[in-house]
Amino acid sequence: MGKVLIIGCGGVASVAIHKCCQNSEVFEEMCIASRTKSKCDALKEKLEGTTKTKITTAQVDANNVDELIALINKEKPDVVLNLALPYQDLTIMDACLATKTHYVDTANYEPEDTAKFEYSWQWAYRERFEQAGITALLGSGFDPGVTSVFSAYALKHEFDEINYIDILDCNGGDHGYPFATNFNPEINIREVSAKGSYWEDGHWVETEPMEIKREYNFDGVGQKDMYLLHHEEIESLALNIPGIKRIRFFMTFGQSYLTHLKCLENVGMTSIEPIMYEGKEIIPLQFLKAVLPDPSSLGPRTKGKTNIGCIFRGKKDGKDKTYYLYNICDHEECYKEVGSQAVAYTTGVPAMIGAMMVMTGKWNKPGVHNMEEFDPDPFMDALNKWGLPWKENRDPVLVD
């Protein structure tokens, strides 16, 4: 079918690369590019002989637009799958614009010097991508990503209008460390230490970090504490799902994680403000990232399951209705398949599927778009085929 250029070679990228290689009828060729080419080479060596996909590797600085343009011009991919850091979204989008190449990512842009993430920077590219005749697909992970597709699917098949969405992200896995993050520590800690917010009656309601706590009994996992966070898909769903009155996002955390995080905050280790240390300027959070376990090393240690999904409330044929769509993913099964824990797996699989939707033309709409703006059915079918089967509950327990 075609060629994908994957930028990044961390835990999520490794999963997406494995899944592209399983899907070699679509991904006939793949170039893996990263700042550290040796990581790309090691993954290529591991996968060659197990797939029909032709794999090449390259070194690239994702902060450098000229380097990115040169690489895209050399490789001539049909789509660029951005699995680098969110700080690098805009430089990669600039390179895709310059080369008129389709773009897919899993997380929205955030500036490195400000703990703030929203779609405004990427939405500003809408007209330019439309004029260039290319598609930018934003947030093709699980949340955002699958949660957005779940919302579009529920609207298409289950409701006349959706009034309330609660997105619940539960990781019931145990990696055995006193404190570690399941994805990039810098991004993870910035996300959970920021103020929370939710969408209600046409405006944002802001909360203090971890201020709102609920308990929920998750299928396959059990009873867990969960906390309201800000999350980017709320922003796009509020625009694209008609009839919405409120959208909230909750994520589970264990007490050990919260205790360690609070201690680190209290001593300044989660700060992104530069400090001087032995004559050199450092960012405390970046130093903390360097001493914490690498998320990609957690796979062989992690046991348990994740449960991520959306509870919808709305109306069908004039009657009130509730509906819960979710996925359960097993950490140990993920490790057996692709050498990763389930948090990376649940992001890497939808990244591959999103690239496949664009590559095959099933999702082809010039401009910059969020996942819920497309027909959800082919994506939902692909989730079942490629490792993230979904479940339905038509009488769920609601979150108060």
Image (cartoon, rainbow, N blue to C red):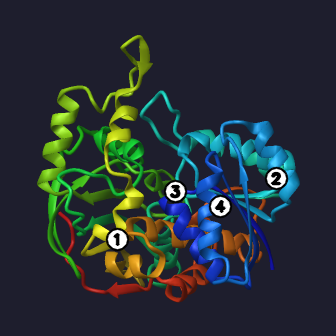
Q: How far apart are marks 1 and 4 (CA)?
A: 33 Å
Q: Of discs 2 and 3, which sits in the foreground? A: 3
- The residue type indicated by label 1 comes to Ile
Q: What element carries label 3?
A: loop
Instruction: Check whether the beta carbons of the residues at disc 2 and disc 4 lie within 8 A of each other.
Output: no
What's the amino acid at mark 4?
A: Asp
Q: Distance between the residues labelled 2 and 3?
A: 20 Å
256 shown above or below 205: below
Q: Which amino acid does label 2 sit on?
A: Ile
Query: Is residue 368 found left or right of 272 in the rendered image?
Result: right
Task: Quote the CA–CA distance across marks 4 and 3.
Answer: 13 Å
Residue designated by label 2: 72
| Residue at figure coordinates x 82%, y 52% from the top left | 72
Decide which of 354, 305 is in the foreground and name it: 305
Which residue is labeled 1 in the image? 308
Quadrant (top left, top right, bottom left, bottom right) of the C terminus: bottom left
Q: In which quarter of the image is the N terminus?
A: bottom right
